[in-house]
Amino acid sequence: MDIKKLERLHPELGITYLKPQRRVGLIVVLTGYGKGKTSSAVGMVVRACGHGMKVSMIQFMKGDIYTGEWDGIRNLDCDVELIPSGMGFCGIQGNPYPHAVHREAAQQAIRLAREKVESGRYDLIVLDEINNALKLNLVNLEQVLELIRLKPPLMHLVLTGRDAHPDIVALTDTVSEVQEIKHAYRKDIEPQPGIDY
Amino acid sequence: MDIKKLERLHPELGITYLKPQRRVGLIVVLTGYGKGKTSSAVGMVVRACGHGMKVSMIQFMKGDIYTGEWDGIRNLDCDVELIPSGMGFCGIQGNPYPHAVHREAAQQAIRLAREKVESGRYDLIVLDEINNALKLNLVNLEQVLELIRLKPPLMHLVLTGRDAHPDIVALTDTVSEVQEIKHAYRKDIEPQPGIDY
C-alpha cells in the first residue's frame, strides 16, 4: 500500500544539515485548552525518529478509547515505543472508574517513567497528559519535579496536557499554550478519526 | 533496532472504538507564534495512518534545511507521502533566493495541492506553512479559498503557519492558536534535533 513517500519538488536545492554546536536536552511543555498538544508530541516523536533517536511515549490518561497514534507509531520503523497506561479520562462522563483506580494506574505509569528516565537509554521521553494527571491528583507535584531533576542532560522531556503546573513551567525551556479559537465539537460535530483520535 | 512498540500497562481494560455516526471532512487551522504547528500536523498524519487513511503533506516553506519529519514519515509503513516544495523561509536572514523564486516554488506547490485535492483520492491533505506563504504573497488568497471550495466532503484539510488569514479562519471547523509562553531560543539555545527540526 506504500507509495512514493518523499518527493522533493525542488531537488536542485541543496539540503543544509543543521548541527547544534551545543547539544541540549530540552524540557518542553504543551498546554492549553485547544486541539494540538498530543498530536504535537506525536510529531516530535516522528521528528526524533528521523534523527535515529530512541523514544518512549507514555500516555497517562489514555488507554480505554482507541486512538490512531497507537497503530501509527507501531507502524514507525524506528526505535520508538508508545505505552497507553491510563484508565481513560478521570471524571469524564461515561468513565466508570473511581479516582483511586485512576490514581493507581497513573502511579504505575509514573514509576515506569522514572525507571525509563533514570535508565539513561532514551533520547526523548514524552509524558502525554501528565499535566492533567497532576491537576487531578493522580500523581503528585513532587513526583513530576523529581523526574525533571533526574533527567539526563541530553535527554529531551516533553510534558503535555491542560493546566500545566507553574512550578513545572518554571523549570522548562519551551512552553506553548494551545488556545482554542474554534472547535468542531461546538458545532456538534463528533470526534473524527485521523483528526481527533 | 526495533523494540516492543506498543505495550499497554492495563490490558485488562477493554478498548472502545469510537465510530462517528456522521463522518465529516474537517478543515483545521494551526496558527500562532509558538512551537507546535507543524509537529501537530505531523501527529495528525500519524493518527490518520493508524486509521489506514491515505495522506499527503505538502510543505510550502521548507525544503532547504533537513528536518527529522522527512525521514520519520518515510519510515511510516502507511499510505502517506511528504513533499517538501519550498525554497526555505522567504525573507529569513541567510536565505539566498529572491521573492520571485520563492513565489514560483509556492505556485508549483499549490498547483500540485489542487491536483491532489481534486483527485478525491486522499483522506487527509496537510498544507504545511501555507498561512505564511499567503502572508508573504507567495500564493494568493483566492487560490487557497479555491482549494477549500474544491475539497471533497469527507476529506480532511489541515493548514498550518503563522498569521492565518481571517477569511480562511472563517471557513474552518477547528482553529488552534499556539502561543509562545517560553522558547529555548530566547536563552540562546540553538534549535535541537528531534524537537525543533
Image (spheres, coloured by chain):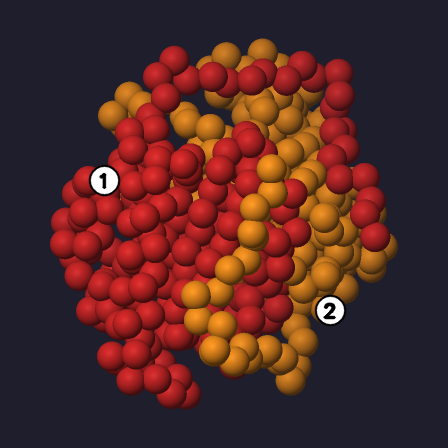
Chain colours: A orange, B red
Element carrying mark 2? loop
Residue A81 visible at all? yes
Q: Residue at x 18, y 48 (%)?
A: B145
Number of labels in the image equals 2
Residue A20 coordinates in the image, percent (x, y): 62, 80
Q: Is residue A6 above or below residue A135?
A: below
Left or right for A173, reference A70:
left
User: B153 or B18: which is nearer to us?
Assistant: B153
Find residue B117 and report its image quarter: top left
Left or right for B93, reference B144:
right
Q: Residue at x 34, y 55 (%)?
A: B112
Q: Which residue is mark 1?
A: B150
Q: Amino acid at mark 1?
A: Leu
Residue B30 coordinates in the image, percent (x, y): 35, 50
Category of crowding for the residue at label 2, using alpha-carbon neighbours closer than 10 angstroms: few (below 14), some (14–19), many (at least 20): few
Find residue B69 and report its image quarter: bottom right
Q: Is residue B104 above or below residue B76?
A: below
Could you tell me which chain the residue with mark 1 belongs to?
B
Q: Which residue is mark 2?
A: A153
Q: Amino acid at mark 2?
A: Pro
Could you tell me which chain the residue with mark 2 belongs to?
A
